Image (cartoon, rainbow, N blue to C red):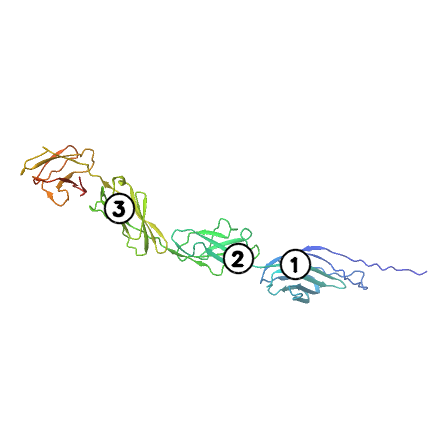
Amino acid sequence: MKKIVFLSVFAVVALFVSNNSVFGQSTNCQIDLTSSWAVTPDWTVFNNVPTSVCVGEQVTFSLTLDGTYVWEISGNYPVANAFVRSGNSTSINEVTQNLNVAGNYEFVITLYGTGCNRDTTLYVSVLGAPTNLGLVATGGNQVCAGNEVDYVASATNAQPGSSTYSWFVDSNPVAVADPTSNIFQYTPANGEEISFSVSNGTCEALLPTPVVMTVYDNPTPIASFDDLNLQNHFCDGQVAIINETSGNANISSWEFVIAGTSFVQGVNNYSWNAGAVQDGQDAYVVVTDNNGCIGTSNVLTISVDQLPDLTVTPVPSSTCNGEYMSLQVSGFTGEGTGPWNLEFWNVAHTVQYPIVGSTPVLPTSSPVNVDVDIPYGTPGVHVKIIETLTGCESFQ
């Protein structure tokens, strides 16, 4: 009786996950009749194969095997099979050339064993780094001291909100409230260099040429009064003058603010008629220089002396030719300044009539009688009041 022998073939399939790939036994496994088992290569995981890199970077395939195997790595670039490596060893340590074209890359790694081979596919995304980096200083890179500047960054392959920005002043990193914003607000100093780097999550790029800031000093104007009596105050009705006295030749315009009212001038002084309503109010000057920088001067206090409103009455109402005329002067009540002196003049204010005896120092209240040598037939007499301490005067 014949014996029938059945040959049984057992195939073993092993699956496990490594890095970003699934390893498995290939289907083109051939029968090895010298053994009842096909020999399938065994391997450990690849070390540090990234899932994404930037354009121009390399990828390293590092693998330790459990024996000596024939192996092959085939990479599909934009040009098919542009990267192919092979060998026969107990380990694999291969580095791609620079991946200079963005896109998704496929690398097939195959190990050939006795009768069976094992392969796996690794995928690497090559991303384009931000390019065409630009930086604009809003208002320009020439500013006045103390001005805050908005720096607006731009780049290809980077979008505000989805990219991360780092800012630098003179190559030193600075804190930014919102690193996802492409706007940096900063008050620069003269000569400082502003730059930034931007990352799209995988790739980072640095602005190649920083923005260099030119910061101009603000002018420092000096305000002073040009008053007739050199006591920093004016007489009621007097022409008052305020000057800007810094001597800065770079100033192009002057704005004088008198008691809250602005007067823009092309020269460094301004004149006006001082009035009692301005007494105690402020005056100052704001200047603009040729760089567009603005400076504000010290503040002056306007002081206006208001002279009394006098009444002059002849006592008696008439006199004889050749005699002195006695005049009663009143109207000092309520005035806080003084004392005053009096002068008497003709209507045209060209002839002064002498006071008989010494000129009296007038009180601040009550009438006073003054004898004046007024020629016969004089049609009218004007009185000039002079404040003794300040020199303020007016005709009544």
Badge nearest the viewer, 3 or 2: 3
Residue 70 occupies quadrant: bottom right
Query: What mark, if any, has residue 389 been given in the picture?
Result: none
Q: Is residue 172 visible?
A: no
| Percent of width and height locating residue 16 | 70, 55
Q: Earlier in the sequence, mark 3 or mark 1?
A: 1
* Number of other residues with Cα within 10 Å of mark 1, as a class: few under 14, some 14 to 19, many 20 or more: some
The reply to whether discs 1 and 2 touch (Cβ–Cβ < 8 Å) is: no
- Report the residue at 52% width, 56% height from top: 198
| Percent of width and height locating residue 85 | 66, 66
* Number of other residues with Cα within 10 Å of mark 3, as a class: few under 14, some 14 to 19, many 20 or more: few
Pointer 2: what residue? 155
Query: What mark, if any, has residue 272 been given in the picture?
Result: 3
Question: What amino acid is labelled 2 in the image?
Answer: Ala
Question: What amino acid is labelled 3 in the image?
Answer: Trp
The reply to whether discs 3 and 1 touch (Cβ–Cβ < 8 Å) is: no
| Percent of width and height locating residue 291 | 36, 56
* Near-viewer residue (237 or 348): 348
- Extreme-left residue of the structure: 322
* Number of other residues with Cα within 10 Å of mark 2, as a class: few under 14, some 14 to 19, many 20 or more: some
Residue 126 occupies quadrant: bottom right
Q: Secondary structure at mark 1?
A: strand
* Vertical side of 185 occupied by 79: above or below: below
Pointer 1: what residue? 123
The reply to whether discs 3 and 2 touch (Cβ–Cβ < 8 Å) is: no
